[in-house]
Image (cartoon, helix red, strand yellow):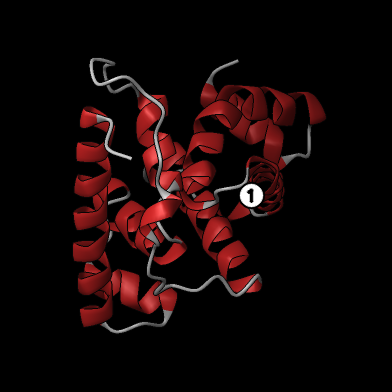
Amino acid sequence: MTEQQIIEACKQNDRKAQNLLYQKYAPKFFGVCRRYIKNERDAEDVLINGFFKVFSKMEQYSGQGNFEGWMRRIMVTESLMFLRKYNMNLSYEMKEEDAVFDKAPDDSLLESDVMKLLDYLPVGYRTIFNLFAIEGYTHKEIGERLSISINTSKSQLIKARKKLKELLIQHQYNVA
C-alpha cells in the first residue's frame, strides 16, 4: 500500500492500515516523545495517545502538506500536554550532582549519548531546546504554545545550551 492508500484506509477506520501506519512511524515518533518526556514508560503513553489522536483526527488531514509533519505536530502537542498535565516546571535549576557520566574520555558521542544528555536537562530547558533547535519553532510560537513570554523562551534556550555545553565537556573529559 502507498502512504496515500494507508491514509485513506485509516480514514475508514481500517485496523490493518492503522497498524501499518503505527509500525512505520512509531519508532521515529517515540524518539520525538522521548526528547520531551524523560521517563520511557511515560513517553510510550504519550506516543499511544498521540496515535489515538492521529487516528481520531485523520479526517482533518486534508492531504495538503507533509503527512509526517502533520503527525509530528500532534506528537509534540501531546508531549507538551503531558508536561502541562503533570505540571512540569519550565524553569528548574539543575544541581551539579544531577549530571554524572561514566564514559571514558575517548568514547565517541553517539545519538544515545545525546539523548542521555537531554535527559539530564531540566524539563523546561529540554522542552524549549527541543521546540526551538529540533522542531524549528520560533520563540513567539514557543511562547504561545507554553503560555510563557518570548524572553522566557529565549533565556531558557540560552540556559539549555549552556548546560548542554557543560555536559558535553563533562562527558568528553570525564569530569565528575
Instruction: Give percent across and percent down for residue 99.
Output: 40, 47
The residue drawn where x is 27% and y is 58% is 160
Quadrant in the picture for the N terminus: top right
Q: Which residue lies furthest to the front in this view?
A: 176
Taking 26 as reference, is 97 above or below it?
A: below
Q: Which of 85 and 7 is in front in this view?
A: 85
> Image point 39% across, 45% down: which residue?
118
* Residue 61 visible in rendering: no
Q: Is residue 165 above or below residue 154?
A: above
Quarter where residue 103 is shown? top left
Please indicate whether residue 174 sits to the left or right of residue 46 in the image: left
* Residue 11 in which image quadrant: top right
Give coordinates of residue 24: x percent, y percent.
58, 22
Q: Position of residue 70 (x, y in %)?
A: 46, 47
The reply, left or right, for residue 31 in relation to residue 102 is: right
Name which residue type carries label 1: Gly
- Residue at image location 26% in from the left, 54% down from the top: 163
Q: Does residue 158 appear to the left or right of 87 in the view shown? A: left
Decide if residue 176 is on the left or right side of residue 42.
left
Secondary structure at numbered mark 1: helix
Rendered-image quadrant of the C terminus: top left
- Which residue is located at x 55 percent, y 56 percent? 79
Q: In this view, does 108 lie above or below 122?
A: above
In depth, the one of 164 and 60 nearer the eye is 164
Q: Name the residue under label 1.
A: 50
